[in-house]
Image: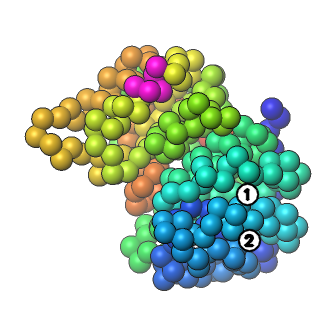
Amino acid sequence: MSLLKPNRLHKGDTVGVIAPASPPNQKNLQSGIEFLKGLGLRVKLGKSVEKIYGYLAGSDQERLEDLHAMFFDSEVKAIFCACGGYGTARIAANIDYQLIKANPKIFWGYSDITFLHTAIRQETGLITFHGPMLGSDIGKEDTHPLSKEGFQQLFEIMDVSYTEHFSPLETLVEGVGSGELIGGNLSLIVSTLGTPYEIDTKGKLLFIEDVNEEPRSVDRMLNQLKMAGKLDDLNGIIIGDFCDCTSKKELSLTLEDVITHYVLSANKPALKGFLMGHCNPHVSIPLGVQAVLNTHEKRLIVESGIL
C-alpha cells in the first residue's frame, strides 16, 4: 500500500482532541490543551471526551463518531488522543477507513492507541505518530521537556535520530536493519493476531513497549508473536520502555531474561533502552515511515512523518 504522509502543522491551525479509549483525567487534559494552545494551535474537543461509560469514554458509537467527525472536519489538521487505557479495538471494525484515506491528517497517541495505529496504517497507508498524550502525560506537572519537544516534528520536516544522547542503549544482536517502523504497545500488538488487523512484520522494524506486565506475561506475549511467525521475517527489533514490568513472585525470570531469550532467538539486529513508551521523558516517533537501526553506532534514524 502506498505511503500517506499528513501535512505539517502551522501556527493558527485547528486540531482535534478525542478519547477513543478510556476517560482521561480532566484536570490533566485541560493542562494538555493549554500546552497545545501554547504551540499556537486552536483546539476542538470531541463530544465524548468528558463522558464516562465504565472504563470507556462513552459508548463505542460515541467514540467512533468522534473519530469520524475529526477526520471529516476539513478545519481539523491533526487529531490528538487524550489518553489510552482500553477500548480502541472495540471500534476498529466499524471505522470508515476510506474516510481516513480521503482525509489524511496527523493522528497522535500511544498505549491502547497502538491498535488504531496498526489498523489505520494497514488499511489506509497513513503515517501516524507514537507520542505522549495530553491527559496522561503532557498535562502532568512533572512532564519532562523532552516529551514536549517531540511535538515540534509536526511543524517542520525533520528526521528523528535517537542515539545515546537520550539514554544508554544496549546491543542485544549486532547488525544493521532497515524498513518500515511499526509497533507500539506489546499487549495491543498481540491482540491484533487473528483479526483483520493482524500486524504485518515482514521486512519491518518492530518497536515494542509495555507497562504493568509481569515477566511471565511478557513471555507469553512474545512467545505468541514467535509462534505466529511475527519474529521470523522482520528486519530489526527496537526495545522501548517496559515500565513496572517486574515480578510479584519470588520464583521468576527477570524481564531481561525474557526479552533476551526471544530477541536472540529471532536473531535480528536489536537495541534496547529507548525512552519510548510509558516513561518520562517519552521520545515521539512516526510509525509507518522508513527507519534504520544501526547497533554498531547505537542509533535509530526515523524518516520525517509529515509533508
- Using the rendered image of the protein, determine whether residue 207 is visible from the camera's viewpoint: no
Q: Earlier in the sequence, mark 1 or mark 2?
A: 2
Please, which colouring scheme is shown? rainbow
- Secondary structure under tag 2 reads strand
Magenta span contains residue 141: no
CA separation in Å, label 1 and label 2: 9 Å
Instruction: Give residue 15's mark.
Output: 2
What is the span of residues highlighted in magenta in the rendered image? 223-227
Residue at figure coordinates x 46%, y 19% from the top left:
227
Image location of residue 218, percent across then percent down: 35, 37
Residue at figure coordinates x 85%, y 53% from the top left:
99
Q: Amino acid at mark 1?
A: Ile
Q: Is residue 249 left or right of residue 115?
A: left
Image location of residue 32, percent across then percent down: 55, 76
Residue at figure coordinates x 41%, y 46% from the top left:
210
CB atoms of marks 1 and 2 within 8 Å: yes
- Secondary structure under tag 1 reads strand
Q: Which residue is mark 1?
A: 106
Image location of residue 293, percent across then percent down: 54, 31
Q: Amino acid at mark 2?
A: Val
Q: Along the line of sight, which residue is nearer the eye, 14 or 145?
A: 14
Q: Residues within 10 Å of mark 1 (few under 14, many from 20)?
A: many
Q: Quadrant of the N terminus?
A: top right
**Looking at the image, residue 67 lies above or below residue 115:** below
Q: Is residue 271 left or right of residue 61?
A: left
**Looking at the image, residue 99 lies above or below residue 265:** below
Magenta span contains residue 226: yes
- Using the rendered image of the protein, determine whether residue 200 is visible from the camera's viewpoint: yes
Residue at figure coordinates x 39%, y 36% from the top left:
272
Image location of residue 209, percent across then percent down: 44, 44
